[in-house]
Amino acid sequence: MFNRLTLVAAALMAVAAPAYAAKDSITLGMVLEPPGLDPTSGAAAATDEVTYANVFQGLTRFGPEGQVEPDLAKSWDISPDGKVWTFHLHKGVTFQDGSPFDASVVKFSLDRINAPGSTNAQKPLYAEIEKVEVIDPLTVKIILKAPVGDFAANLAWGDAEMVSPKSIKDEATHPVGTGPFMFKDWVKGDKVDLVAYPGYWGEKPKLKKVTFKFISDPTAAFAAMMSGDVDAFPNFPALETLKQFENNPRFKVMIGNTQGETLLSMNHRNKYLADIRVREAIAHAINRRDIIDGAMFGYGTPIGTHFPPFSKDYVDLRSLSAYDPALSRELLKEAGVKDLKLRLALPPPAYARRSGQIIQQELKAVGIDVEITNLEWAQWLSQVFKNHDFDLTIVSHTEPNDIGIYARPNYYFGYDNPGFQGLMKRLTVETDKTKRAAMLREAQAIIAKDYVNGFLFQLPKTGVANAKIMGLWKNAPTQANDMTQVYWKD
């Protein structure tokens, strides 16, 4: 009898075992679908949110608190003059198509950034690279024209991740990297599936499958979380419902920081917006508190320049563009502008659409008529970012330490200030931390006093997840959903 009962119990346990097995897959919600999956050939943050640290890796990477860490390079040496960086690579690394990763791939990847016809969105970050030399398969030397104070951090951007010469032609639709997860499929308009790469060179991830589910509508995002169709939403769009998740033990809410300066960007190619008085008038017509309360339900930190408020080098310049509609009307009168009509092009995120409605009314109150056009993300990238066909737009710039974009006269908002450009050139080659800090403070003041854009708020990271999910980033020091340390708690 004892043996029979034991066998029955063992059989029952065997049948029940799968129910208690640790979960090894996860579905993440994302508001925006990437237009492509090659982070080295475009500007969309959503591309990095899927691929950064998961599919692709760089010589260095950003950690969860923004620290620069070794990645495919296990270490590096810097010459005394700061112009020669020698990287020592990990041994035995392969791409997910089986091809080897070595120093020749580093040369290929970095040369490709600055090659004629390159569509890399951050080419200026790597403009000081003079040449890349292969010393041996595991050693590569990068020679700079001049020292670059943030070079290790620049290499941590998704734009500098390593790509395989063998698979480069299909990278946008079928990405192949060296990371712990490999691309499985992409159902356009719905999801991207990644699966664990069996040949991964480093610490194996605990998850076997990651699905990124694209849900742009806040109501649908709430329903998906509540039903369990989505396990986590690292940047949850339905902020008005966060209290419901906070009061439900099934979930956890994670409020953190991002690098996302949210702007009312102005096109300086428009003859009216080229006038600093008109830009200042627009800035004084905007009530940041109305936007944060009305569009963000109280989440977000007001800003007065393009720099994260949690940075030690941040300067609070909000007073320069304080809410003052009477001053706005005076400035417009001084500029001789009456019955101004402007086009406001809005991308899909809820923060942009909701902020746009509020700003439309606030500008109307000072005599500026704003026509809103809602664009899908691919449309926004083509029409606004690439072709500069807009007057105003609202978008969060989530790239880390990106104040240097104001030194690019061909950038989408078209700010052209030679003095600022010279300052950024000096900052690039400056290695002294005290001097760099002073330059960053000066840069913040220049763009605030030039009223380049309407500086609205720092985008918060509002994450919602199943309470049993561990390892998700609370903060977003870069555009990433790093799944390498994520697991389900028993």
Image (cartoon, rainbow, N blue to C red):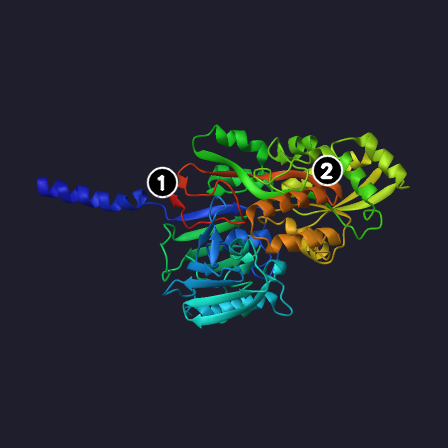
* Circle on res. 325: none
Mark 2 residue type: Gln
Q: Is residue 175 visible?
A: no
Report x, y in % for residue 467: 42, 36
Report x, y in % for residue 296: 63, 34
Report x, y in % for residue 127: 61, 62
Q: Residue furthest front?
A: 80
Position above or below: 318 against 84:
above
Instruction: Look at 86% across and 42% down and name the residue there.
Output: 340
Label 2 crowd (10 A; few <14 / some 14-19 / many >=20): some
Query: Which residue is label 1 attached to?
Result: 489
Left or right, residue 421 beside residue 195: right
Instruction: Look at 76% across and 54% down and name the residue there.
Output: 389
Instruction: Look at 83% across and 39% down and name the residue there.
Output: 368
Position above or below: 330 against 202:
above
Sequence-first disc among 2 and 1: 2
- Point out the image quarter for the C terminus: top left
- Point out the image quarter for the N terminus: top left
Q: Is residue 144 visible?
A: yes
Out of 88 and 426, give the one closest to the viewer: 426
Report x, y in % for residue 194: 45, 56
Mark 1 residue type: Lys
Element at label 2: helix
Position above or below: 242 against 347:
above
Query: Which residue is label 2 attached to?
Result: 357
Left or right, residue 100 beside residue 395: left
